[in-house]
Image (cartoon, rainbow, N blue to C red):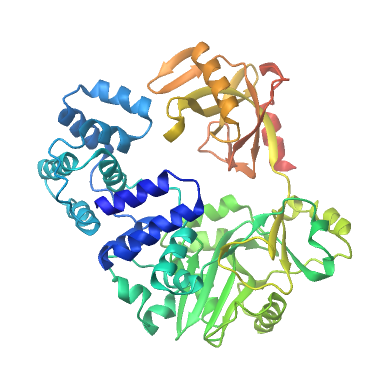
Amino acid sequence: MKDFARCIRAIDESNKTTVKVEALKRYFDTASDSDKLWCVALLSHRRPKRPVTTTQLREWAAEESGIALWLFEESYHIVGDLAETIALLTAGAERDDTESRSLTEIVQLIIDLKGKEKEDQRQVITDIWRSMEAFECFVFNKILTGSFRIGVSQKLMTKALAQSLDKEESHIAHRLMGNWTPESTDFESLLLTDDGLVDASRPYPFYLAYQLESGPESLGAIEEWSVEWKWDGIRGQIIHRKGEVFIWSRGEELVTDRYPELKQMAARLPKGCVLDGEILPYMDGSPLDFSLLQKRIGRKTVSKKLLEEVPVVFMAYDLLEMDGKDLRLEPFELRRQRLEEIADADIPSLIISPQVQAGTWGELAQIREESRSRKVEGFMLKKKSGTYHTGRVKGEMWKWKVEPYTIDAVLTYAMRGHGRRATLYTDYTFGLWDGDKLVTFAKAYSGLTDEEFRAVDQFIRKNTVNRFGPVREVHPELVFEIAFEGLSESSRHKSGVATRFPRIKRWRKDKTASEANSLSDLKSLILS
Protein backbone atom coordinates (compact mmCIF):
# COMPACT_ATOMS: atom_id res chain seq x y z
CA MET A 1 0.00 0.00 0.00
CA LYS A 2 2.90 2.34 0.72
CA ASP A 3 4.25 1.82 -2.81
CA PHE A 4 0.82 2.47 -4.31
CA ALA A 5 0.47 5.67 -2.26
CA ARG A 6 3.95 6.81 -3.41
CA CYS A 7 2.89 6.21 -7.01
CA ILE A 8 -0.30 8.23 -6.53
CA ARG A 9 1.64 11.06 -4.85
CA ALA A 10 4.08 11.23 -7.78
CA ILE A 11 1.15 11.42 -10.20
CA ASP A 12 -0.67 13.99 -8.07
CA GLU A 13 2.35 16.29 -7.76
CA SER A 14 3.12 16.58 -11.48
CA ASN A 15 1.36 18.04 -14.49
CA LYS A 16 3.73 16.31 -16.92
CA THR A 17 2.39 13.31 -18.79
CA THR A 18 5.82 11.67 -18.96
CA VAL A 19 6.23 11.85 -15.17
CA LYS A 20 2.81 10.28 -14.60
CA VAL A 21 3.51 7.46 -17.05
CA GLU A 22 6.96 6.81 -15.55
CA ALA A 23 5.53 6.67 -12.01
CA LEU A 24 2.90 4.13 -13.06
CA LYS A 25 5.41 2.05 -15.01
CA ARG A 26 7.71 1.88 -11.96
CA TYR A 27 4.80 0.62 -9.90
CA PHE A 28 3.77 -1.97 -12.50
CA ASP A 29 7.39 -3.14 -12.82
CA THR A 30 7.69 -3.97 -9.11
CA ALA A 31 4.20 -4.69 -7.74
CA SER A 32 2.70 -8.15 -7.34
CA ASP A 33 0.23 -9.31 -9.97
CA SER A 34 -2.70 -8.92 -7.57
CA ASP A 35 -1.64 -5.38 -6.63
CA LYS A 36 -1.17 -4.47 -10.30
CA LEU A 37 -4.66 -5.78 -11.03
CA TRP A 38 -6.22 -3.67 -8.27
CA CYS A 39 -4.24 -0.62 -9.42
CA VAL A 40 -5.61 -1.06 -12.95
CA ALA A 41 -9.12 -1.56 -11.56
CA LEU A 42 -9.01 1.57 -9.40
CA LEU A 43 -7.67 3.68 -12.26
CA SER A 44 -10.40 2.41 -14.60
CA HIS A 45 -13.25 3.23 -12.18
CA ARG A 46 -13.74 -0.34 -10.92
CA ARG A 47 -13.86 0.53 -7.24
CA PRO A 48 -15.18 -1.63 -4.38
CA LYS A 49 -18.58 -0.57 -3.08
CA ARG A 50 -18.56 1.73 -0.06
CA PRO A 51 -19.26 -0.48 2.98
CA VAL A 52 -20.04 2.29 5.50
CA THR A 53 -21.75 5.68 5.33
CA THR A 54 -19.88 8.97 5.32
CA THR A 55 -21.92 9.94 8.40
CA GLN A 56 -20.37 7.01 10.28
CA LEU A 57 -16.88 7.95 9.07
CA ARG A 58 -17.36 11.54 10.24
CA GLU A 59 -18.45 10.40 13.70
CA TRP A 60 -15.64 7.86 14.06
CA ALA A 61 -13.00 10.32 12.83
CA ALA A 62 -14.19 13.01 15.26
CA GLU A 63 -14.09 10.57 18.18
CA GLU A 64 -10.74 9.13 17.10
CA SER A 65 -9.16 12.59 16.92
CA GLY A 66 -10.78 13.72 20.18
CA ILE A 67 -12.70 16.69 18.80
CA ALA A 68 -16.38 17.61 18.76
CA LEU A 69 -18.37 16.64 15.68
CA TRP A 70 -19.20 20.28 14.91
CA LEU A 71 -15.49 21.10 14.86
CA PHE A 72 -14.83 18.18 12.53
CA GLU A 73 -17.57 19.48 10.22
CA GLU A 74 -16.07 22.98 10.23
CA SER A 75 -12.66 21.48 9.46
CA TYR A 76 -14.17 19.51 6.60
CA HIS A 77 -15.78 22.63 5.11
CA ILE A 78 -12.39 24.38 5.16
CA VAL A 79 -10.37 21.44 3.77
CA GLY A 80 -13.09 20.64 1.23
CA ASP A 81 -12.38 16.91 0.99
CA LEU A 82 -13.65 14.31 3.47
CA ALA A 83 -10.87 11.78 2.82
CA GLU A 84 -8.19 14.43 3.35
CA THR A 85 -9.85 15.82 6.48
CA ILE A 86 -9.97 12.38 8.10
CA ALA A 87 -6.35 11.69 7.14
CA LEU A 88 -5.12 14.98 8.59
CA LEU A 89 -6.90 14.34 11.90
CA THR A 90 -6.39 10.61 12.44
CA ALA A 91 -3.34 9.31 10.60
CA GLY A 92 -0.24 7.84 12.16
CA ALA A 93 -1.05 7.40 15.85
CA GLU A 94 0.37 3.85 15.84
CA ARG A 95 2.38 4.03 12.65
CA ASP A 96 5.00 1.38 11.89
CA ASP A 97 7.17 2.25 8.89
CA THR A 98 8.71 -1.22 8.79
CA GLU A 99 5.45 -2.99 7.89
CA SER A 100 2.72 -2.27 5.42
CA ARG A 101 -0.22 -4.23 4.13
CA SER A 102 -0.36 -4.66 0.36
CA LEU A 103 -2.89 -2.81 -1.78
CA THR A 104 -4.73 -6.10 -2.30
CA GLU A 105 -4.94 -6.72 1.45
CA ILE A 106 -6.27 -3.22 2.09
CA VAL A 107 -8.94 -3.49 -0.60
CA GLN A 108 -9.94 -6.93 0.66
CA LEU A 109 -10.35 -5.51 4.16
CA ILE A 110 -12.69 -2.87 2.70
CA ILE A 111 -14.70 -5.52 0.83
CA ASP A 112 -14.93 -7.71 3.95
CA LEU A 113 -16.39 -4.83 6.00
CA LYS A 114 -19.74 -5.36 4.32
CA GLY A 115 -21.96 -7.40 6.63
CA LYS A 116 -19.84 -6.84 9.75
CA GLU A 117 -21.29 -5.33 12.90
CA LYS A 118 -20.94 -1.56 13.15
CA GLU A 119 -18.45 -1.72 16.03
CA ASP A 120 -16.30 -4.26 14.16
CA GLN A 121 -16.29 -2.01 11.10
CA ARG A 122 -15.19 0.91 13.23
CA GLN A 123 -12.37 -1.11 14.81
CA VAL A 124 -10.94 -2.22 11.45
CA ILE A 125 -11.09 1.28 9.96
CA THR A 126 -9.63 3.15 12.94
CA ASP A 127 -6.82 0.57 13.22
CA ILE A 128 -5.91 1.28 9.60
CA TRP A 129 -6.05 5.05 10.15
CA ARG A 130 -3.60 4.74 13.04
CA SER A 131 -1.18 2.59 11.06
CA MET A 132 -0.72 4.95 8.09
CA GLU A 133 0.99 8.25 7.43
CA ALA A 134 -1.24 11.07 6.21
CA PHE A 135 -1.03 10.66 2.42
CA GLU A 136 -1.32 6.87 2.55
CA CYS A 137 -4.33 7.33 4.84
CA PHE A 138 -5.79 9.85 2.38
CA VAL A 139 -5.52 7.30 -0.46
CA PHE A 140 -7.08 4.61 1.75
CA ASN A 141 -9.98 6.92 2.60
CA LYS A 142 -10.54 7.70 -1.07
CA ILE A 143 -10.85 3.99 -1.83
CA LEU A 144 -13.00 3.40 1.26
CA THR A 145 -15.48 6.16 0.35
CA GLY A 146 -15.69 5.17 -3.32
CA SER A 147 -14.31 8.55 -4.41
CA PHE A 148 -10.88 7.45 -5.67
CA ARG A 149 -10.12 9.61 -8.71
CA ILE A 150 -6.75 11.06 -9.69
CA GLY A 151 -5.37 13.18 -12.51
CA VAL A 152 -4.48 10.35 -14.84
CA SER A 153 -6.60 9.10 -17.71
CA GLN A 154 -7.18 5.46 -18.49
CA LYS A 155 -5.21 6.07 -21.68
CA LEU A 156 -2.09 7.07 -19.69
CA MET A 157 -2.52 4.09 -17.38
CA THR A 158 -2.82 1.84 -20.43
CA LYS A 159 0.33 3.37 -21.92
CA ALA A 160 2.33 2.71 -18.73
CA LEU A 161 1.03 -0.85 -18.45
CA ALA A 162 1.85 -1.55 -22.10
CA GLN A 163 5.41 -0.30 -21.56
CA SER A 164 5.80 -2.45 -18.46
CA LEU A 165 4.52 -5.58 -20.22
CA ASP A 166 6.25 -4.77 -23.54
CA LYS A 167 2.94 -5.03 -25.38
CA GLU A 168 1.18 -2.86 -27.96
CA GLU A 169 -0.88 -0.13 -26.31
CA SER A 170 -3.91 -0.90 -28.48
CA HIS A 171 -3.74 -4.57 -27.44
CA ILE A 172 -3.72 -3.68 -23.73
CA ALA A 173 -6.56 -1.17 -24.19
CA HIS A 174 -8.68 -3.85 -25.85
CA ARG A 175 -7.95 -6.41 -23.10
CA LEU A 176 -9.02 -3.92 -20.42
CA MET A 177 -12.45 -3.39 -21.97
CA GLY A 178 -15.47 -5.28 -20.71
CA ASN A 179 -17.25 -6.29 -17.54
CA TRP A 180 -14.38 -7.57 -15.38
CA THR A 181 -13.39 -7.04 -11.75
CA PRO A 182 -10.33 -8.19 -9.76
CA GLU A 183 -12.68 -10.59 -7.98
CA SER A 184 -13.75 -12.27 -11.23
CA THR A 185 -10.36 -12.61 -12.94
CA ASP A 186 -6.61 -12.46 -12.31
CA PHE A 187 -3.84 -10.41 -13.88
CA GLU A 188 -2.56 -13.14 -16.19
CA SER A 189 -6.01 -14.15 -17.46
CA LEU A 190 -7.01 -10.55 -18.07
CA LEU A 191 -3.89 -9.36 -19.88
CA LEU A 192 -1.61 -12.22 -20.83
CA THR A 193 -3.68 -15.33 -21.62
CA ASP A 194 -5.76 -15.79 -24.77
CA ASP A 195 -9.27 -16.81 -23.77
CA GLY A 196 -11.80 -17.10 -26.58
CA LEU A 197 -14.77 -17.16 -24.22
CA VAL A 198 -13.75 -13.86 -22.64
CA ASP A 199 -12.90 -12.32 -26.01
CA ALA A 200 -16.37 -13.12 -27.35
CA SER A 201 -17.95 -10.44 -25.17
CA ARG A 202 -15.13 -7.91 -25.17
CA PRO A 203 -15.81 -4.56 -26.92
CA TYR A 204 -13.18 -2.44 -28.63
CA PRO A 205 -11.92 0.79 -27.02
CA PHE A 206 -14.01 3.66 -28.37
CA TYR A 207 -12.53 6.22 -30.76
CA LEU A 208 -13.46 9.70 -29.50
CA ALA A 209 -13.39 13.05 -31.31
CA TYR A 210 -12.30 16.52 -30.27
CA GLN A 211 -14.41 19.58 -31.00
CA LEU A 212 -13.25 21.32 -34.18
CA GLU A 213 -11.01 24.19 -33.06
CA SER A 214 -11.44 26.46 -36.09
CA GLY A 215 -13.39 26.60 -39.33
CA PRO A 216 -13.61 23.33 -41.30
CA GLU A 217 -11.68 24.96 -44.16
CA SER A 218 -8.52 24.18 -42.15
CA LEU A 219 -9.14 20.47 -42.82
CA GLY A 220 -8.46 20.79 -46.54
CA ALA A 221 -10.64 19.63 -49.42
CA ILE A 222 -14.18 18.66 -48.43
CA GLU A 223 -13.96 15.71 -50.86
CA GLU A 224 -11.52 14.00 -48.46
CA TRP A 225 -14.08 13.93 -45.66
CA SER A 226 -17.24 12.02 -44.87
CA VAL A 227 -19.89 14.07 -43.06
CA GLU A 228 -22.63 12.68 -40.79
CA TRP A 229 -25.05 14.17 -38.29
CA LYS A 230 -23.94 14.07 -34.65
CA TRP A 231 -26.69 12.13 -32.93
CA ASP A 232 -27.88 12.86 -29.39
CA GLY A 233 -28.08 9.40 -27.85
CA ILE A 234 -25.91 6.90 -25.99
CA ARG A 235 -22.70 5.78 -27.69
CA GLY A 236 -22.52 2.02 -27.86
CA GLN A 237 -21.14 -1.10 -29.51
CA ILE A 238 -23.20 -4.08 -30.62
CA ILE A 239 -21.35 -7.39 -30.76
CA HIS A 240 -22.53 -10.61 -32.41
CA ARG A 241 -19.96 -13.33 -31.81
CA LYS A 242 -20.24 -17.10 -31.38
CA GLY A 243 -24.02 -16.97 -31.48
CA GLU A 244 -24.28 -14.47 -28.62
CA VAL A 245 -25.20 -10.78 -28.53
CA PHE A 246 -23.57 -8.16 -26.31
CA ILE A 247 -24.49 -4.46 -26.18
CA TRP A 248 -22.00 -2.16 -24.44
CA SER A 249 -22.29 1.51 -23.56
CA ARG A 250 -19.30 3.83 -23.89
CA GLY A 251 -19.06 3.71 -20.08
CA GLU A 252 -18.24 -0.02 -20.43
CA GLU A 253 -21.58 -1.07 -19.00
CA LEU A 254 -23.24 -4.18 -20.42
CA VAL A 255 -26.78 -3.05 -21.30
CA THR A 256 -27.99 -5.91 -23.52
CA ASP A 257 -31.15 -6.66 -21.54
CA ARG A 258 -32.19 -2.99 -21.30
CA TYR A 259 -32.77 -2.77 -25.04
CA PRO A 260 -34.59 -5.98 -26.07
CA GLU A 261 -35.44 -4.61 -29.52
CA LEU A 262 -31.73 -4.08 -30.20
CA LYS A 263 -30.89 -7.54 -28.85
CA GLN A 264 -33.34 -9.07 -31.32
CA MET A 265 -31.94 -6.94 -34.12
CA ALA A 266 -28.33 -7.87 -33.32
CA ALA A 267 -29.12 -11.59 -33.50
CA ARG A 268 -29.82 -11.05 -37.22
CA LEU A 269 -26.43 -9.46 -37.87
CA PRO A 270 -23.68 -11.53 -39.50
CA LYS A 271 -21.67 -13.58 -37.00
CA GLY A 272 -18.31 -12.17 -35.97
CA CYS A 273 -19.62 -8.62 -36.35
CA VAL A 274 -19.11 -5.49 -34.20
CA LEU A 275 -20.95 -2.21 -34.87
CA ASP A 276 -20.16 1.21 -33.41
CA GLY A 277 -23.00 3.68 -33.18
CA GLU A 278 -25.66 5.42 -31.13
CA ILE A 279 -28.56 4.03 -29.10
CA LEU A 280 -31.19 6.54 -30.11
CA PRO A 281 -34.84 7.14 -29.11
CA TYR A 282 -36.60 7.14 -32.46
CA MET A 283 -40.17 7.21 -33.76
CA ASP A 284 -41.87 7.92 -37.09
CA GLY A 285 -38.60 8.48 -38.93
CA SER A 286 -37.21 11.06 -36.50
CA PRO A 287 -35.12 11.14 -33.30
CA LEU A 288 -36.93 11.80 -30.03
CA ASP A 289 -35.67 14.08 -27.28
CA PHE A 290 -32.78 12.64 -25.25
CA SER A 291 -34.73 13.24 -22.03
CA LEU A 292 -37.12 10.46 -23.08
CA LEU A 293 -34.22 8.02 -23.36
CA GLN A 294 -33.33 8.79 -19.75
CA LYS A 295 -36.53 6.97 -18.74
CA ARG A 296 -34.91 3.75 -20.02
CA ILE A 297 -31.28 4.29 -19.04
CA GLY A 298 -31.56 3.24 -15.40
CA ARG A 299 -34.02 0.37 -15.86
CA LYS A 300 -32.77 -3.19 -16.04
CA THR A 301 -36.20 -4.43 -17.12
CA VAL A 302 -38.38 -2.47 -19.53
CA SER A 303 -42.18 -2.64 -19.54
CA LYS A 304 -44.18 -3.13 -22.71
CA LYS A 305 -45.65 0.34 -22.22
CA LEU A 306 -42.20 1.97 -22.05
CA LEU A 307 -41.06 0.03 -25.12
CA GLU A 308 -43.99 1.54 -26.99
CA GLU A 309 -43.54 5.06 -25.60
CA VAL A 310 -39.76 5.24 -26.10
CA PRO A 311 -38.70 2.89 -28.90
CA VAL A 312 -34.99 2.89 -29.76
CA VAL A 313 -32.91 2.16 -32.82
CA PHE A 314 -29.19 1.62 -33.27
CA MET A 315 -27.84 4.38 -35.51
CA ALA A 316 -24.71 2.60 -36.79
CA TYR A 317 -21.82 4.67 -38.11
CA ASP A 318 -18.86 2.29 -38.15
CA LEU A 319 -18.00 -1.39 -38.60
CA LEU A 320 -15.14 -2.53 -36.36
CA GLU A 321 -15.19 -6.26 -37.00
CA MET A 322 -16.56 -8.54 -39.74
CA ASP A 323 -16.28 -12.32 -39.99
CA GLY A 324 -14.19 -12.16 -36.82
CA LYS A 325 -11.58 -9.88 -38.46
CA ASP A 326 -10.56 -6.61 -36.80
CA LEU A 327 -11.20 -3.83 -39.35
CA ARG A 328 -9.99 -0.85 -37.32
CA LEU A 329 -6.86 -0.32 -39.41
CA GLU A 330 -8.84 -0.33 -42.66
CA PRO A 331 -9.70 3.11 -44.14
CA PHE A 332 -13.02 4.52 -42.94
CA GLU A 333 -14.29 4.64 -46.52
CA LEU A 334 -13.90 0.85 -46.80
CA ARG A 335 -15.43 0.19 -43.37
CA ARG A 336 -18.38 2.38 -44.35
CA GLN A 337 -18.94 0.44 -47.59
CA ARG A 338 -19.04 -2.86 -45.71
CA LEU A 339 -21.38 -1.35 -43.12
CA GLU A 340 -23.80 -0.34 -45.87
CA GLU A 341 -23.76 -3.91 -47.20
CA ILE A 342 -25.11 -5.08 -43.83
CA ALA A 343 -27.88 -2.49 -44.01
CA ASP A 344 -29.04 -3.90 -47.34
CA ALA A 345 -30.48 -6.85 -45.38
CA ASP A 346 -33.23 -4.51 -44.07
CA ILE A 347 -32.85 -5.36 -40.37
CA PRO A 348 -35.47 -3.72 -38.08
CA SER A 349 -34.17 -1.24 -35.47
CA LEU A 350 -30.92 -0.80 -37.41
CA ILE A 351 -30.28 2.44 -39.31
CA ILE A 352 -27.02 3.40 -40.99
CA SER A 353 -26.13 7.00 -40.17
CA PRO A 354 -26.78 8.90 -43.43
CA GLN A 355 -23.99 10.87 -45.02
CA VAL A 356 -24.58 14.58 -45.56
CA GLN A 357 -23.70 15.80 -49.04
CA ALA A 358 -22.29 19.28 -49.70
CA GLY A 359 -20.06 20.74 -52.41
CA THR A 360 -18.26 23.26 -50.18
CA TRP A 361 -17.60 23.88 -46.51
CA GLY A 362 -19.73 27.01 -46.75
CA GLU A 363 -22.67 25.00 -48.05
CA LEU A 364 -22.15 22.52 -45.23
CA ALA A 365 -22.18 25.34 -42.68
CA GLN A 366 -25.62 26.38 -43.94
CA ILE A 367 -26.95 22.83 -43.61
CA ARG A 368 -25.52 22.71 -40.07
CA GLU A 369 -27.97 25.46 -39.09
CA GLU A 370 -30.73 22.85 -39.41
CA SER A 371 -29.25 20.79 -36.56
CA ARG A 372 -31.63 21.75 -33.78
CA SER A 373 -34.73 21.35 -35.93
CA ARG A 374 -33.47 17.85 -36.77
CA LYS A 375 -32.79 17.14 -33.05
CA VAL A 376 -29.08 16.55 -33.65
CA GLU A 377 -26.01 18.28 -32.19
CA GLY A 378 -24.19 19.22 -35.39
CA PHE A 379 -21.83 17.22 -37.60
CA MET A 380 -19.21 14.48 -37.31
CA LEU A 381 -16.36 14.90 -39.80
CA LYS A 382 -14.44 11.72 -40.66
CA LYS A 383 -11.39 11.46 -42.90
CA LYS A 384 -12.22 8.93 -45.59
CA SER A 385 -8.71 7.46 -45.38
CA GLY A 386 -8.68 7.48 -41.56
CA THR A 387 -8.31 4.45 -39.31
CA TYR A 388 -10.23 3.74 -36.09
CA HIS A 389 -8.05 4.93 -33.20
CA THR A 390 -8.17 4.24 -29.47
CA GLY A 391 -9.43 7.03 -27.19
CA ARG A 392 -9.51 10.75 -28.02
CA VAL A 393 -7.17 11.48 -30.93
CA LYS A 394 -6.90 14.57 -33.15
CA GLY A 395 -6.57 14.59 -36.92
CA GLU A 396 -8.91 12.12 -38.61
CA MET A 397 -12.24 12.65 -36.83
CA TRP A 398 -13.78 15.84 -35.47
CA LYS A 399 -17.11 16.91 -34.01
CA TRP A 400 -18.46 20.19 -35.34
CA LYS A 401 -21.23 20.96 -32.88
CA VAL A 402 -23.71 23.81 -33.00
CA GLU A 403 -23.21 26.62 -30.53
CA PRO A 404 -24.75 25.91 -27.10
CA TYR A 405 -27.88 27.56 -25.77
CA THR A 406 -27.13 30.57 -23.55
CA ILE A 407 -29.09 32.63 -21.07
CA ASP A 408 -28.22 35.38 -18.56
CA ALA A 409 -28.93 34.40 -14.95
CA VAL A 410 -28.43 35.84 -11.45
CA LEU A 411 -26.15 34.29 -8.82
CA THR A 412 -28.36 33.37 -5.83
CA TYR A 413 -26.51 30.76 -3.72
CA ALA A 414 -22.94 29.52 -3.29
CA MET A 415 -20.96 26.74 -1.65
CA ARG A 416 -17.26 26.16 -1.17
CA GLY A 417 -15.54 24.14 -3.86
CA HIS A 418 -13.42 21.03 -3.47
CA GLY A 419 -9.73 20.25 -3.77
CA ARG A 420 -7.62 23.31 -4.48
CA ARG A 421 -10.76 25.49 -4.41
CA ALA A 422 -11.86 24.26 -0.99
CA THR A 423 -11.30 27.67 0.62
CA LEU A 424 -13.22 29.58 -2.07
CA TYR A 425 -16.92 29.78 -2.86
CA THR A 426 -16.95 28.36 -6.40
CA ASP A 427 -20.07 26.15 -6.60
CA TYR A 428 -22.92 28.39 -7.68
CA THR A 429 -26.70 28.31 -8.02
CA PHE A 430 -28.38 30.58 -10.56
CA GLY A 431 -31.90 31.94 -10.87
CA LEU A 432 -34.12 33.48 -13.53
CA TRP A 433 -36.91 36.01 -13.05
CA ASP A 434 -40.48 34.82 -12.65
CA GLY A 435 -42.32 38.07 -12.06
CA ASP A 436 -40.46 39.73 -9.18
CA LYS A 437 -38.99 36.44 -7.85
CA LEU A 438 -35.83 34.57 -8.81
CA VAL A 439 -36.43 30.87 -9.47
CA THR A 440 -33.50 28.43 -9.41
CA PHE A 441 -32.82 26.85 -12.80
CA ALA A 442 -29.23 25.54 -12.78
CA LYS A 443 -26.02 24.97 -10.83
CA ALA A 444 -22.53 25.42 -12.25
CA TYR A 445 -18.95 25.41 -10.98
CA SER A 446 -16.79 25.82 -14.09
CA GLY A 447 -16.08 28.48 -16.68
CA LEU A 448 -14.36 31.29 -14.75
CA THR A 449 -10.66 32.04 -14.41
CA ASP A 450 -8.95 31.68 -11.01
CA GLU A 451 -8.87 35.46 -10.71
CA GLU A 452 -12.60 35.70 -11.41
CA PHE A 453 -13.38 32.96 -8.89
CA ARG A 454 -11.45 34.90 -6.23
CA ALA A 455 -13.34 38.09 -7.07
CA VAL A 456 -16.72 36.35 -6.87
CA ASP A 457 -15.67 34.72 -3.60
CA GLN A 458 -14.98 38.15 -2.09
CA PHE A 459 -18.38 39.38 -3.25
CA ILE A 460 -20.11 36.35 -1.70
CA ARG A 461 -18.41 36.86 1.68
CA LYS A 462 -19.41 40.54 1.76
CA ASN A 463 -22.95 40.05 0.46
CA THR A 464 -24.25 36.97 2.27
CA VAL A 465 -27.86 37.50 3.38
CA ASN A 466 -28.57 34.04 4.81
CA ARG A 467 -26.88 30.73 5.62
CA PHE A 468 -28.14 27.15 5.38
CA GLY A 469 -25.35 24.90 6.65
CA PRO A 470 -22.55 25.13 4.04
CA VAL A 471 -24.76 27.12 1.64
CA ARG A 472 -24.76 30.91 1.51
CA GLU A 473 -27.61 32.90 0.05
CA VAL A 474 -26.21 36.05 -1.56
CA HIS A 475 -27.61 39.41 -2.51
CA PRO A 476 -28.93 39.02 -6.10
CA GLU A 477 -26.58 41.31 -7.98
CA LEU A 478 -24.07 39.40 -10.15
CA VAL A 479 -25.16 38.25 -13.61
CA PHE A 480 -23.54 35.41 -15.57
CA GLU A 481 -24.10 34.01 -19.02
CA ILE A 482 -24.86 30.31 -18.62
CA ALA A 483 -24.31 27.91 -21.53
CA PHE A 484 -25.92 24.47 -21.82
CA GLU A 485 -26.28 21.77 -24.46
CA GLY A 486 -30.00 21.09 -24.30
CA LEU A 487 -33.15 21.54 -22.26
CA SER A 488 -36.46 19.81 -21.69
CA GLU A 489 -39.58 20.13 -19.57
CA SER A 490 -39.20 18.57 -16.12
CA SER A 491 -41.64 18.17 -13.25
CA ARG A 492 -38.70 17.40 -10.93
CA HIS A 493 -37.20 20.88 -11.21
CA LYS A 494 -38.63 23.95 -9.53
CA SER A 495 -38.24 25.92 -12.75
CA GLY A 496 -40.07 23.24 -14.74
CA VAL A 497 -37.03 22.92 -17.02
CA ALA A 498 -34.01 20.60 -16.93
CA THR A 499 -30.79 21.75 -18.63
CA ARG A 500 -27.94 19.52 -19.83
CA PHE A 501 -24.30 20.28 -18.94
CA PRO A 502 -24.77 23.84 -17.63
CA ARG A 503 -21.55 25.86 -17.20
CA ILE A 504 -20.56 29.51 -16.89
CA LYS A 505 -19.68 31.08 -20.23
CA ARG A 506 -18.79 34.55 -18.94
CA TRP A 507 -19.38 37.08 -16.18
CA ARG A 508 -21.77 39.75 -17.47
CA LYS A 509 -20.36 42.77 -15.62
CA ASP A 510 -22.20 44.97 -18.11
CA LYS A 511 -25.61 43.86 -16.81
CA THR A 512 -27.59 44.46 -13.64
CA ALA A 513 -29.69 41.75 -12.02
CA SER A 514 -32.89 43.29 -13.38
CA GLU A 515 -31.55 42.79 -16.92
CA ALA A 516 -31.14 39.02 -16.51
CA ASN A 517 -33.43 36.69 -18.43
CA SER A 518 -36.76 35.35 -17.25
CA LEU A 519 -38.11 31.85 -16.81
CA SER A 520 -40.37 32.42 -19.82
CA ASP A 521 -37.26 33.23 -21.90
CA LEU A 522 -35.82 29.85 -20.91
CA LYS A 523 -39.03 27.98 -21.70
CA SER A 524 -39.26 29.66 -25.09
CA LEU A 525 -35.99 27.91 -26.04
CA ILE A 526 -37.73 24.55 -25.76
CA LEU A 527 -40.03 25.57 -28.59
CA SER A 528 -37.33 27.17 -30.75
Q: Which residue is drawn at 25% across and 40% down?
A: 53
Q: Nearer the viewer, residue 436 or 44?
A: 44
Horizontal side, residue 457 vs residue 133: left or right: right
Q: Is residue 45 visible?
A: no
The percent position of residue 469, horizontal first and vertical second, equals 37, 21
From this view, report whether residue 359 is shown above or below residue 91: below
Q: In which quarter of the image is the C terminus?
A: top right
Whole-percent x, y for residue 72 in the image: 26, 25
- Report x, y in % for residue 259: 49, 67
* Front residue of this view, candidates 527 and 179: 179
Which image quadrant is residue 209 in? Answer: bottom right
Q: Is residue 210 visible?
A: yes
Location of residue 369 with respect to 250 vertically, above or below: above
Residue depicted at 72% across the width and 42% down the height: 527
Number of marks in the rendered image: 0
Q: Of residues 358 and 381, which is closer to you in this image? A: 381
User: Which sits in the foreground, 117 or 504?
Assistant: 504
Q: Which residue corresponds to the image point at 41% horizontal and 62% vertical from the top-left?
A: 301
x, y percent for residue 256: 45, 69
Q: Name the residue at 31% across, 75% down.
A: 188
